Image (tube, rainbow, N blue to C red):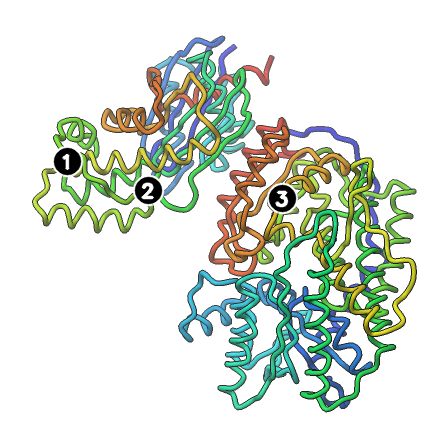
Amino acid sequence: MTTQVKEYPTERLKCWNEAKNLRRKYYEDYLNAHEKGGLRWCGGAWSFSAIPAGLGEDVYCLTGEPYGATIAFFKDFAAQCHDAVEAAGFPRTLCAYMRNYWGSVLLDKYILADGTVVDGYPEADFIWQDHICCSHAKWYQIVNWLEKKRGKKVPMYSVDVSVGYTTDHLEDYKVNYIVQQLNDGIEWMKKVTGRTYNDKLLCDAVWNEIKSTSLWAEICTLNQAVPAPLDEKTMYSLYVMGTLIKHRPECVAFYEMLRDEVKDRVRRGIASTPHERFRVITDTQPPWAFLKIFREMQKYGAVSVGSLYTFGLIGMWEYKPDGTFVPRQIPPKKPQTREEALRMIVEWTLYKPEWAHFTVPEVKTQMMASIVKQWKVNAVLLHYNRGCEGLSVHIAENRFGLIKAGIPVFPFEGNMGDEREFDFAGTLSRLTAFFESMGLKKLKE
Amino acid sequence: MITAGIDVGARYAKVVLLDDGKVLAKGKGLVGFDVLKSASEVFENALKTSGLSRNDIRGFVATGMGRDAVHLKPPINAEQIVSVVVADAAGAFHVIPTVKTVIDVGSEEGRGIKVEEGKVRDFVINERCAAGAGTFIEAMARALEVRVEDMGPLALKATKAIPMNAQCCVFAESEVVTLIHSKVAKEDISKAIHDAMAGRIASMILRVGVEKDVVLIGGVALNPGFLPPLKKELRTDIIVPESPDFVGALGAALIASKHKE
């Protein structure tokens, strides 16, 4: 039985290979940093990554969450990591990214972007982390401890960002609290690395980060077009640059190239999937080992055009007076001094929409409802993600809020980084029921 | 026009043959390892009862977790498949047109469905643990060494209410064993099992909300021990229609009729 629907033209992204190369290079650069006399640091993707950039052009980072997600995608290595972590006595209820990361350290193996596993986990020269959730607070403390057990000394610095999400007015005391920690952190980095600190490099990195995160929001806005030029599965491979190298000029250049290409796709009506007729958004990290669920959705003509997570983990947004959710206006000029740079990046970062996940569920619901309206979305798929306490907190409240706003919601349970906690067949069966309840039939049976 | 609906569940396959909304024949049988073979036998028996042949059937829709096994596969050759949620809504609306909330408790899954004029508005399905499904009662019946069909009547004879965990089927079984060792009466244990399951189903149903009329369907609706605690938990009257275990298959047959119109 076939349901006839309009067919849109599709095209492979021209900058796809560039995205792959950047990601490949990122993991290789970290691995080989010491051979070139460079420095390695590790920490979360939410870390103020522009700050270590002042130590030199040869400073490479490994951000924990994307690394945990990469491991999750390659199921065999993920299974080895889970075994290693559980054998070491850690419970499987902890953050799945964190467990994957620890598994890699425990196994003394490192995985590259293409799934190649190399012997020898490359220890960092220092840890530069921030405390965004209960797991992030402990993540690198354990890494530090595991490295110590391997005879490596990896000093750690953590920034407390518990001042909360900023909705309207950003109070000075919040900014000062974090700026002071970053100032102290710079002195600490100089001490533990023995390097001098270059404020010009810091200013460049801060400006790059502001431009990257604004550009990503601009790219996401282009997905308001029907048909959507990008689907969320593709966006995962693109937003990731902002979780790896948001402070680097390569990231700015890539997002500028991507923005221009996506604009061109919109102009020419190029779709991400040929039979778009039902638009959804998701929430929180997907179950990385089961991205094929997005392909299953396409069989119903359903396409995920993004999520607050995909848009807001990296993209920076704000509300205009007319209530529209738009990319955040970047500051009028590049910072010139250390103090200017630190204040600018702290103020910019505190508006990150993803903070709302942790502290203000009603604001998160409001932002999701705005996306539904502006991106012409038909339904929301909520991932009750057992692998991430931080971003799963309040999801049930978001569900109620969205339903109250008249938005159809499909919740499903899973785990972003541990495939043992995702029931693909069961989820697919429920998703099928949801699509049928929305009046959709498979395009081909 | 004659249409057929088959609900291939985890434990039983149910078939309904329909002629312009009137049930011509029904059939039910256990689903074995060979799902297509078992479902086909149920279907052939229903055909035999009605005196019809496959060629008389103008539309055939399959539902249930085993629906793919009979989709476009002879002798059933169901032309279309629909999810249980959609079939339940259609079937429940047909038998109780005032229905707003459908509770379907089968052997493998429990479901809550908000319904508007036979269409699904929202739904919820139990995840992962069988503690919210008929299998739970089966497992507990084994522990109590009674037949599963005796569990409900046994619960109705209870004199005490004993709280029991139903978050996990395995842990619940060890709790039952403890109660047995404590010389608690089988009647009271059976009631505790039904109460626990009703509590679990009710908490799930409350996620979509309870709006009258509330209809209970599925194989577990045949269990007299389950209805009283469920009513108590949800604080509402609950209607159990005739042949509640066939409502999904009926819905599938109705969808087949509509599709052919």
Is A277 situated above or below A91?
above
10 Å crowding of disc 2: few (<14), some (14-19), many (20+): many
Q: Which residue is mark 2?
A: B131
Q: CA distance from mark 2 to mark 3?
A: 29 Å
Dot 2 falls on a residue whose secondary structure is: helix
Quadrant of the image containing the C terminus of chain B: top right
Dot 1 falls on a residue whose secondary structure is: helix
Dot 3 falls on a residue whose secondary structure is: helix
Q: CA distance from mark 2 to mark 1?
A: 18 Å
Q: Kindly identify the residue that appears in the image at 71 percent across and 49 percent down.
A: A232
Amino acid marked by disc 1: Asp
Amino acid marked by disc 2: Ala
**Residue nearer the viewer, A164 or B173:** A164
Examine the image and state in which quarter residue B250 appears.
top left
Examine the image and state in which quarter residue B241 appears.
top left
Examine the image and state in which quarter residue A350 appears.
bottom right
Viewer-side label of 1, 3: 1
Q: Which residue is mark 3?
A: A296
Dot 2 and dot 3 within a common chain: no
Viewer-side label of 2, 3: 2
Amino acid marked by disc 3: Glu
Q: Kindly identify the residue that appears in the image at 64 percent across and 50 percent down.
A: A356
Is A411 situated above or below A124?
above
Q: Kindly identify the residue that appears in the image at 88 percent across and 64 percent down.
A: A253
Q: CA distance from mark 1 to mark 3?
A: 47 Å
Residue B73: x %, y % from top left:
50, 33
Give the number of marks. Answer: 3
**Mark 2 touches mark 1? (CB < 8 Å):** no
In the image, is A412 to the left or to the right of B24? right
Residue A30: x %, y % from top left:
71, 79
Is A351 situated above or below A186?
above
Q: Which residue is mark 1?
A: B188
